[in-house]
């Protein structure tokens, strides 16, 4: 099998190809989005930061499965005393735009007693979307805080993933929980960290709320005056998980979302399947293809389709194995398969990559087998000799050989 001395992560390539295919107009931090597991967790935070800090358009990633079916009706959440000058979307006309200054005033009123300084905001009629941020100090240390607003399609993969606690393989956190509110909204609160490798003790706590109508509110707070490159000012962010949840649920934010102009390109109604054949649950399929009796599985992505992972151990050290299953990838074949790739008699292209793990710890390497059938169906499997993307190696080489990875990637089980 051909070796490549250094190769970027195939899941990173898949993301970049997906962005080009979707016409997204910004250069994502490919290293930060290295793992497709970012789909389940850190993807959410990275996307929000890109929108708030860089004005980037939101990402749409392939490799998601399932749907969050939020019930309609069920009454309204209690209103806060704060007002931004709108009372909800009218059936005949959109409410007037809400200014950035109004959002700053709303945040000031919703926070406990203290000082909010260094505020920035975008109104509901500004691109790429409304947000408000500042530095809050309750007398116990300055802390950055931000609120961003948007819409997701009710019942979509994005809605489900937004409020789902991520796997700890990809996102380090101390606690995470999801709550359904009386009005049917779902809110996830996560107590995590700014840096996945915990190289700095900056804590990042976040709340993500999605209403049955698709209104999306995201709140983030840190125990430092800035999310990066600022000293820790307090042991924990200022708002407790309960207060964070209440802040995200404040009705003022939903009113502001209602004042956002409708996106003519945004899907409406119930999501419809786009796959031409049934999708398989990745982790169970991957486990069925492992050598019988040789491995124990300590962590799994469950029944997710499109992307999945297992943490396996043959008694000599843990390894993270990831698989992406995609369709319609023929148009990026030239970007994914270079001169060192192999073409099988049936037209399937195969590329093998071995090299250091770009984000891994000491001694971490990544082995990858990427396959693309002539009809555009792609399976890419990647294995680390560590139990998580940022961890140090647990062994010299991954447990599964290149030959075994190849056999798994070419298995017909991925395409029922």
Image (cartoon, rainbow, N blue to C red):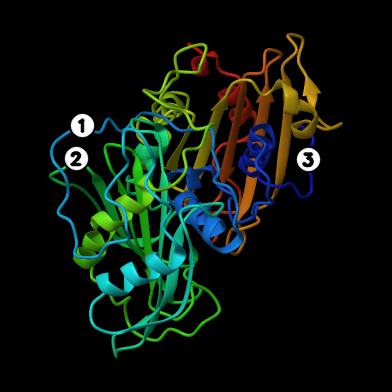
Q: Which residue is mark 2?
A: 184
Q: Which residue is mark 3?
A: 3
Residues under numbered marks 1 and 2 in contact, where contact means CB atoms less than 8 Å apart: yes
Quadrant including the N terminus: top right
Q: Position of residue 276 (x, y in %)?
A: 52, 12
Q: Nearer the viewer, mark 3 or mark 1?
A: 1
Disc 3 versus disc 1: distance between alpha carbons?
A: 51 Å
Mark nearer the N terminus (2 vs 3):
3
Q: Residue furthest right?
A: 339
Disc 1 versus disc 2: distance between alpha carbons?
A: 6 Å
Q: Residues within 10 Å of mark 1 (few under 14, many from 20)?
A: some
Residue nearest the observer in this picture, 115 or 10: 115
Residue appearing at x 46%, y 67% in the figure: 194
**Quarter occupied by residue 136:** bottom left
- Is residue 351 placed above or below 253 in the rendered structure? above
Q: Which residue is mark 1?
A: 71
- Is residue 121 placed above or below 236 in the rendered structure? above
Residue nearest the observer in this picture, 372 or 340: 372
């Amino acid at each position: 099998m051909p070796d490549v001395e250094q190769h970027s992560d195939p899941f990173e390539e898949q993301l970049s190809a997906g962005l080009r295919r979707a016409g997204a107009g910004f250069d994502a931090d490919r290293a930060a989005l290295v793992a497709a597991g970012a789909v389940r967790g850190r993807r959410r935070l990275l996307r929000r930061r890109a929108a708030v800090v860089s004005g980037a358009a939101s990402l749409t990633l392939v490799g998601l499965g399932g749907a969050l079916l939020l019930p309609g009706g069920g009454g309204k959440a209690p209103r806060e005393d704060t007002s931004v000058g709108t009372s909800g979307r009218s059936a005949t006309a959109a409410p007037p735009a809400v200014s950035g200054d109004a959002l700053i005033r709303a945040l000031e009123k919703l926070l406990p007693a203290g000082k909010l300084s260094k505020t920035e905001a975008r109104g509901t009629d500004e691109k790429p979307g409304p947000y408000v941020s500042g530095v809050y100090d309750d007398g116990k240390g300055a802390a950055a805080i931000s609120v961003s607003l948007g819409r997701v399609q009710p019942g979509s993969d994005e809605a489900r993933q937004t409020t789902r606690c991520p796997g700890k393989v990809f996102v380090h956190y101390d606690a995470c929980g999801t709550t359904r509110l009386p009005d049917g909204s779902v809110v996830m609160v996560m107590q995590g960290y700014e840096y996945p490798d915990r190289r700095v003790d900056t804590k990042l706590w976040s709340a993500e709320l999605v209403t049955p109508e698709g209104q999306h509110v995201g709140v983030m707070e840190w125990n430092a005056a800035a999310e990066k490159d600022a000293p820790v000012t307090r042991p924990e962010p200022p708002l407790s998980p309960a207060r964070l949840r209440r802040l995200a649920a404040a009705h003022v934010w939903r009113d502001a979302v209602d004042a956002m102009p409708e996106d003519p390109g945004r899907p409406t109604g119930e999501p419809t399947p786009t796959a031409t054949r049934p999708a398989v649950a990745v982790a169970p399929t991957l486990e069925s293809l492992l050598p019988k009796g040789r491995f124990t599985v300590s962590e799994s992505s469950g029944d997710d389709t499109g992307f999945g992972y297992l943490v396996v151990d043959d008694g000599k050290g843990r390894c993270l194995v990831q698989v992406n299953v995609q369709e319609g990838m023929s148009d990026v074949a030239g970007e994914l398969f270079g001169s060192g790739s192999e073409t099988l008699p049936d037209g399937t292209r195969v590329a093998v990559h071995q090299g250091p793990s770009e984000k891994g710890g000491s001694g971490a390497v990544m082995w990858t087998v990427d396959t693309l059938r002539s009809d555009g169906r792609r399976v890419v499997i990647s294995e680390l000799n560590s139990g998580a993307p940022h961890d140090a190696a647990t062994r010299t080489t991954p447990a599964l050989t290149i030959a075994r990875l190849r056999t798994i990637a070419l298995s017909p089980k991925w395409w029922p």
